Amino acid sequence: MSAPQINRQAVGRKPYDPQDWAAAGSCRRDDVDPELFFHPEGETGKARQDRVVAAKAVCADCPVLATCLEYALARGEQYGVWGGTGEEERAELRRVERLRRRRVRVAS
Ligand code: SF4
């Protein structure tokens, strides 16, 4: 799966209404277990890794992937798989965006 395109303006922005797009998500299909997207209490190691990989596979062909990721970044979603990204990946995206904004402030 190629990296999703990120609307940098969405990071830290007030989230918009998910009703507009979430119903079109691949995770809403009847054959997809919604529990794939959030880790159960105490899940670690390979079980967690396998679940995240399976969730990302569902995201890979989702028609609203980019919107979902923008929403998660704007809302600061810390938990679960959103827009084809896991928790650590979104934390890294937020960190990079904070650094970018800091550099822009310093440069201006
Ligand atoms: S990108 Fe993934 S989590 Fe987001 S709506 Fe699509 S399938 Fe669901």
Image (cartoon, grey):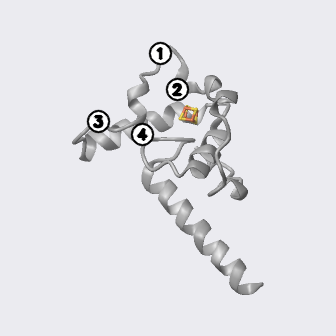
Q: How many labels does the image show?
A: 4
Q: In this view, does 104 lie to the left or right of 18?
A: right
Do the CB atoms of the residues marked 1 and 4 lie less than 8 Å apart?
no
Query: What residue sits right under mark 2 in the picture?
Result: 27
Q: How crowded is mark 4: few (under 14 residues within 10 Å), some or many (20 or more)?
A: some
Compute the Cα span from label 1 to label 3.
Answer: 20 Å
Task: Indicate which quadrant contains ligand 1.
Answer: top right
Q: Disc 3 or disc 2, which is closer to the eye?
A: 3
In the rendered structure, which disc, 3 or 2, sits on the residue that comes first in sequence?
2
Q: Residue at x 65, y 73 (%)?
A: 100
Dot 2 or dot 4: first in sequence order is: 2
Image coordinates of residue 90 in percent, x first then y, are: 51, 54
Label 3 to label 2: alpha-carbon separation: 17 Å
- Marks 1 and 3: CB-CB under 8 Å? no
Q: In this view, does 95 lie above or below 102?
A: above
The residue beneath circle 3 is 40
Sequence order check: which comes first, mark 1 or mark 3?
A: 1
What is the x, y in percent for residue 104? 72, 78
- Nearer the observer, disc 2 or disc 4? 2
The residue lying at 33 percent from left, 38 percent from top is 39
Q: Which mark is residue 31?
A: 1
Q: Is residue 26 left or right of residue 42?
A: right
Q: What residue type is labelled 4?
A: Val
Q: Which amino acid does label 1 sit on?
A: Asp
